Structure formats: structure tokens, C-alpha cells
Image (cartoon, rainbow, N blue to C red):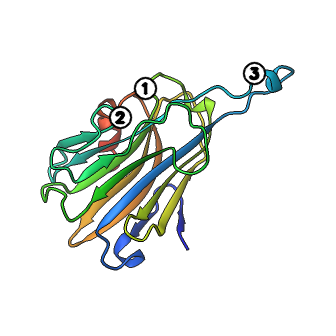
Amino acid sequence: MAISLSKGQTISLKKESAGLKRVHMGVGWDPVAPKGFFAKLTGPKDIDLDASLVTFDGAKEPTGIVYFGQLQSADGSIVHTGDNLTGDGDGDDEVIKVDLEKLDPKVETIVFFVNSYQGQTFNEVDNAFCRVLDDDTQKELCRFTLTDQGAHTGVVMAVLSRNGGDWQLKAVGMPGVGRTADQLVPDALRHI
């Protein structure tokens, strides 16, 4: 059974999955349902959120970015599976896969974001979540549900960091200012 994380909670992924080699970070969301007389006629509008990440070295310097415009890290260890422009459907709307064994050893921290490139705010988003799976077994290791709405356009969702030979995941869920992952780096640095 997956662990449901709260803001600021940290878990060791080693305890959750012995021999963890590859993780899959999925994010999902729904548009807020419209209210009022015309709600049935118009239905919810599409919300284009983007899953993205930035990698950092031990000195907290950015070393790489993966997002809808850069679907793979330079070494191929991180792959974004594609852009969802609407939030429609059940389950993960966007997925980023990380091969921990192939990851550049300089990378000490990976920060996962959800951001709105088009500038739609999180007041327009419902049921947003981030989850981490063992990519080999598809076992869900943990899930973080974002409950805060607001006028922000980005959220620092989670931080995956090395702790010796182990990996730890911290749920963050803090609003950020920016429509792209590189614009959210200052917000990320507050959480690593």
C-alpha cells in the first residue's frame, strides 16, 4: 500500500522498495467544474499543466531540466513521456521516468514541479496529485495530494534527494512564481 504524504513529510524510498532502480513520477489534475446556470452547457475548460523537473548537484547548482520542450536529460537517464494539454482522463496526466542507476553521479537532488505555461492559476485546478512508482513493478510508493488552490502558476511538488546510497522523497506542495521549471528554481532552492 502506498504512503500518503503530507506537506514536508519525508520517506526513504529504500524502505519502500528494495533494489529500487527506476522511478516514475506521475502527476494528474482536473479542471475545476464550472458553477452556475450555464455549467452544464459549457463544462469544465481545459487546463494545461506541465510536469517538469530540475536536477541539482551537491552545491545546489542546477545541472539539467526536463519538461515538455526538453523531453530527455542529456545522459538519457530522465525521460518525460509527453505533454497533456487538457488534464482530461483518469490517472497520470503527465509522467517523468528517472533511471536512478544511469543518473549522473553529480546529481544529488531532483525537484519535481507542476506549472502552468499558459498562465492558468491553481484556482482553476482540482484534484491535483503527484505520485511516485517503482517503474519496474508499477507499485505506487507514495502519493501527495495537493489541496491548496490559489493565484499561483507553479507548485514545487516534491524533492528526491540522495542520502548516501539511499534516495529520500519529500512532499513539498508549495506555491511558486513562474510558468516554467527554470523560473521556479528560486522556489526550489528553498526546499533543498
CA distance separating discs 2 and 3? 28 Å
What amino acid does circle 1 point to? Tyr
SS under mark 2: loop
Classed neighbour count for the residue bearing mark 2: other residues with Cα under 10 Å, few (<14), some (14–19), many (≥20) = some
Task: Tell me where residue 11 appears, x and y as whole percent.
Answer: 41, 68
Amino acid marked by disc 3: Thr
Q: Which residue is mark 1?
A: 117
Tell which tag, 1 or 2, sits nearer the viewer.
Answer: 2
Lower sequence index among marks 1 and 2:
2
Q: Nearer the viewer, residue 115 or 100?
A: 100
Q: Quadrant of residue 123?
A: top right
Left or right of 68: which side holds 101?
A: left
Q: Which residue is mark 3?
A: 42
Select label 1 or label 3 by which is in front.
3
Q: Relative to 30, does residue 167 appear above or below in the rendering?
A: below
Q: Residues within 10 Å of mark 1 (few under 14, many from 20)?
A: some
Residue at x-position 35% and y-position 34%: 68
How many angstroms separate mark 1 from mark 3 (CA)?
A: 23 Å
Name, please, the residue furthest toward the right.
Answer: 37
Amino acid type at mark 2 = Phe
Task: Quickly name the residue at label 2.
Answer: 68
**Nearer-N-terminus badge (2/3):** 3
SS at mark 1 in the image: loop
Mark 1–mark 2 Cα distance, whole angstroms, equals: 10 Å
Which of marks 3 and 1 precedes in the sequence? 3
**131 above or below 157?**
below
Label 3: few (<14), some (14–19) or many (≥20) C-alpha neighbours in 10 Å = few
| Coordinates of residue 15 in the picture (x, y in percent) | 39, 78
- Location of the N terminus by quadrant is bottom right
State whether residue 32 is above or below residue 37: below
Kindly state the secondary structure of the residue where label 3 is placed.
Answer: helix
